[in-house]
Amino acid sequence: MIHDLVRYQYDNSSSLPREHVLLVSLGCSWGKCAFCDYQDDKSSSVLACDILNKKVLSQVRGQEIGNSCLDVTCSASYTELPFTTMNYIRQTCEDKGIKTVILEGHYIYRDTNHLYTEFFGSRGIEVLFRCGVETFDENIREKTLRKGLPGVTPEQLSQYFQWVNIMFGMDCQTIDQLKKDIEIALGHFERINLSIYTSIPGGPERDQAAIEAFYNSKYYQDLLSNPQIEIFDEWDGDNIHNVGHDIL
């Protein structure tokens, strides 16, 4: 378990205002993504997960601050949170007037989505599912990032997920390739999280020049004005997007 992380944030600047929580899972079964440094944020103890997760969820305020959406992430997929934690999430949504919950997970768990739709839907709560595809360039996605989505098409993904994560800023990427990813994503999904890559030991190198070129481009300004797209950068100067940051 990683203890120095920001685990709660309310973002009311987005086109979809929501509260974010970063919870502790039982561990990522896939565990091979080359860019992920959250895999140690886990516990084999359901009790340990529940204690921390319940504390994080206690910060959710919902209708008290005019919010009706909760974004749930963890170091794994939503299926790898203890079921007791999932009960806490649902109860928190009920208690705080949350009408929509966002769950993020790997494509390999797609056939379980309907169970979570039914679980939350029984209390009148809508579920949106998000998948970390990172790029639709299969060569980069599988050989460099090791995402575990060989041969999976955008059409197949969109049957199960309404939202995707795209990543940019590795030394194997270009702005032209990013444009293709965004175009494909906009054609198949309701929303996009665009994450600017943060380098980790043993992972791909961060291409600072490409990132700066992106930030200085008209394309970046165009993306900022698109309500379907949100851009996250853990190295941003204002430290705006806090969930997941190490506590300074």
Image (cartoon, rainbow, N blue to C red):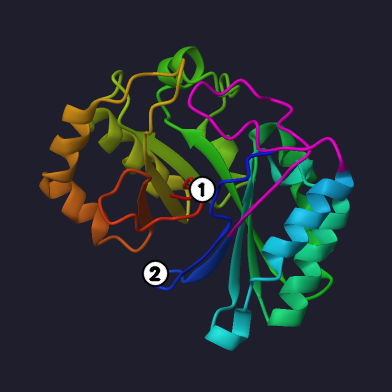
Choose between 145 and 245: the one closer to the eye: 245
Q: Is residue 191 left or right of residue 216?
A: right
Residue beneath disc 1: 244
Residue depicted at 74% across the width and 27% down the height: 29
Based on the picture, tell me whether residue 240 belongs to the magenta stretch.
no
User: Above or below — where is 245 with respect to 147?
Assistant: below
Choose between 243 and 223: the one closer to the eye: 243
Q: Which residue is farthest front? A: 248
Q: Is residue 90 left or right of residue 195?
A: right
Residue range of the region highlighted in magenta in the rendering: 21-45
Q: How many marks?
A: 2
Residue depicted at 50% across the width and 45% down the height: 164
Residue beneath disc 2: 15
Q: Mark 1 or mark 2: which comes first in sequence?
A: 2
Residue 116 position, x and y percent, is 78, 55
Q: Main secondary structure of the magenta part?
A: loop
Distance from label 1 to label 2 (Cα)?
Answer: 21 Å
